[in-house]
Amino acid sequence: MSTTEQLDMIGIDRLREIGSVKWSRFPHAIGAFVAEMDFPAAPAVAEAVKGAVDGGLTGYLPTAVSDRMAEAVSRWQCDRYGWDVPVERIRPVPDVLTALRSTIDFFTEPGSKIVLPTPAYMPFLTIPAMHDREIIEVPMLLDDGRYVYDLDGIDRALGDGGGLLILCNPYNPVGRVFERTELEAVAEVVERHGARVFSDEIHAPLVFAPHRHVPYASIGPEAAAHTITAASASKAWNLPGLKTALVILSNDADAETWTRPEVSWAEHGTANLGVVATTAAFDDGREWLAETLDYLDGSRRLLGELLAAHIPGMGYRAPEGTYIAWLDARGLGIDGSPADFFREHAGVAMTDGIACGAAGEGFLRFILATPRPIIEQAVTQMAQALRERTAG
Ligand SMILES: Cc1ncc(COP(=O)(O)O)c(C=O)c1O
């Protein structure tokens, strides 16, 4: 059976039985609001995790095991993106948001503001306040339907006390994969202000040809000197519950800072099984990833066809990377929250764009890493809800 046939066969009952957050929070709705994949784990990853449990690797994280992960990540960065990262500069952390919190605490000036392009991944809007930091939202601009950075806006925000720019590439929620020239333009602005960048590259393995991921810190020595990069296998191989991500340090000063015990404390809580799974994913899960990306590629196109046929008023541009669809519901004439409308009347649970900042108002975030028949069912139910509203 082909990968497509296998994935297409996974039904809603099975997904509810597994009971992920996406499929259990709203028991009567199609779950499309959490960035999780509904596909079984890559065999190489599953075997590695089973092997670790059978082999008794359930104590604290041994250095040799995390070193092996750093080697696998270094190989991945080099093979995929031509970025040479010394193994000792790749540090384990439990998750990307821990990396962000440490970056705010230890790599920015106290009291400096966080510059956040919006619409943004939701926790980016809430975490800075936990560190007594103000956010300056800089809405992205639309260039012929494609989201681009507002460089003047970023420039103004950095001039207005901004100390850290949060970059997300590939971009959750709008699906952009930034070109080298775009990243270079950002680096130039950041450098002018002596600011820092947190580059969240958690979705990097999920990029559709002809787009290519370019690690921000790899574009030149200045970007390397002002950046903390976060990477992970958790999105592409669906491992967020295994609590493992990576911080990549790209300059001597940051590597030195990381050796301070209160800074490297961020490594605490990284899970053995996640480390083993991540190593297997980057080294031995490449073929699985290619097949999964093929499937997702078909799905992002299918979603476009279905929307054009059944909800032509819904704006959609297929993501260049990630499995997140950013839907423009502003033309549908829905009063109030479009996410509430579709959850209540169509049985489809999505994230309301407003949760991604004011720039997301009227939009929806739909996770398309689900079997294609479920995408079809979701669109059919949404179209039906819109028809019934008109009829009513
Ligand atoms: C852009 C982005 N960053 C971070 C995260 C969260 O990652 P973690 O679970 O490693 O903190 C997500 C999860 O969806 C994400 O999309």
Image: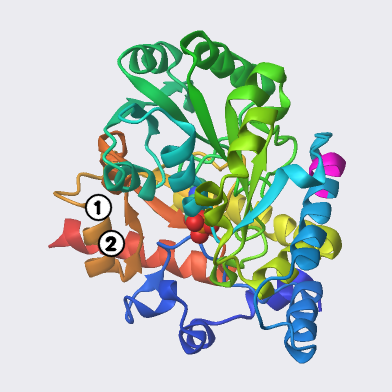
The label shown at residue 23 is none
Check disc 1: other Cα within 10 Å, few if <14, some if 14-19, many if 20+.
many
Residue matched to label 1: 338
Residue at horizontal 34 percent and vertical 56 percent from the top: 351
Determine which quarter of the picture holds residue 70: bottom right
Report whether residue 291 is seen: no
Vertical arrangement, residue 84 with respect to residue 261, above or below = above
Residue 328 relative to residue 278: left or right: left
Magenta stretch, residue numbers: 76-80
Residue 145, given in percent of the width and then of the height, sits at 47, 27
Asked if marks 1 and 2 touch (Cβ < 8 Å), the reply is yes
Residue 210, given in percent of the width and then of the height, sits at 75, 35
The amino acid type of the residue labelled 1 equals: Pro
The amino acid type of the residue labelled 2 equals: Phe
Check disc 2: other Cα within 10 Å, few if <14, some if 14-19, many if 20+.
many
Q: Tell me the quadrant of the picture where the C terminus can be found.
A: bottom left
Q: For residue 168: magenta?
A: no
Dot 2: element: helix
Residue matched to label 2: 342
Residue at horizontal 57 percent and vertical 62 percent from the top: 369
**Which residue of the protein is positioned furthest toward the front in this rendering?**
261
Residue 53 relative to residue 26: left or right: right
Residue at horizontal 45 percent and vertical 70 percent from the top: 377
Residue 13, given in percent of the width and then of the height, sits at 48, 88
Residue at horizontal 43 percent and vertical 56 percent from the top: 366
- Nearest the eye: 3 or 244: 244
Q: For residue 79: magenta?
A: yes
